[in-house]
Image (cartoon, helix red, strand yellow):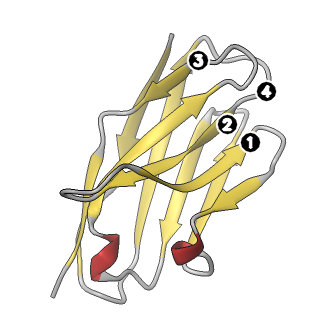
Amino acid sequence: QVQLVESGGGLVQPGGSLRLSCAASGSIFGFNVMGWYRQAPGKQRELVATATSGGTTNYLDTVKGRFSISRDNAKNTVSLQMNSLKPDDTAVYYCNWRSPITGDVFWGQGTQVTVSS
């Protein structure tokens, strides 16, 4: 089992910035992927950004150049720095941990990000 605790999120004006953080604990070992997904009302959950324990990152096209994901393998944390936020970024953001080796997938409880003037 892996537990994920998220922090950050909130209300921000368009063009503003927010930082999300997620700490993982539990049975963490081997190659794994941590990242962030989001789900807006009436829409499917989508991948925002991921980072492997080897350092490879991946981003949703619409956030490239605005969002930056980083992780600390020693602390089992992952952060998402979100800049130049747009109203379309409004969603519940979920931290995700998965192991491509075992197939295990775990989710955080979600944190609301609202971009509005």
Residue located beneath label 2 in the image: 33
Q: In the depicted view, which residue is nearer to us: 85 or 17?
A: 85
In the image, residue 74 lies at what x, y percent?
A: 72, 33
Look at 79% across and 20% down and name the residue there.
30
Q: Which mark is residue 31?
A: 4
Mark pair 2, 1: CA separation: 4 Å
Look at 79% across and 27% down and name the residue there.
31
Q: In the depicted view, which residue is nearer to us: 73 or 53?
A: 53
Q: Which amino acid type is marked by label 3? A: Asp
Q: Is there CB contact under 8 Å for labels 2 and 1? A: yes
Mark pair 4, 2: CA separation: 7 Å
Considering only order in the chain, which callout, 1 or 4, is on the residue closer to the N terminus? 4
Q: Which amino acid type is marked by label 2? A: Val
Of the residues tagged 3 and 1, which is closer to the observer?
Answer: 3
Residue located beneath label 3 in the image: 104
Residue located beneath label 1 in the image: 52
Q: Is there CB contact under 8 Å for labels 3 and 1? A: no
Using the image, determine if residue 90 lies above or below residue 2: below
Q: How many circles with numbers are drawn on the protein?
A: 4
Considering only order in the chain, which callout, 1 or 2, is on the residue closer to the N terminus? 2
Mark pair 3, 1: CA separation: 15 Å
Of the residues tagged 2 and 3, which is closer to the observer?
Answer: 3
Q: Is there CB contact under 8 Å for labels 4 and 1? A: yes
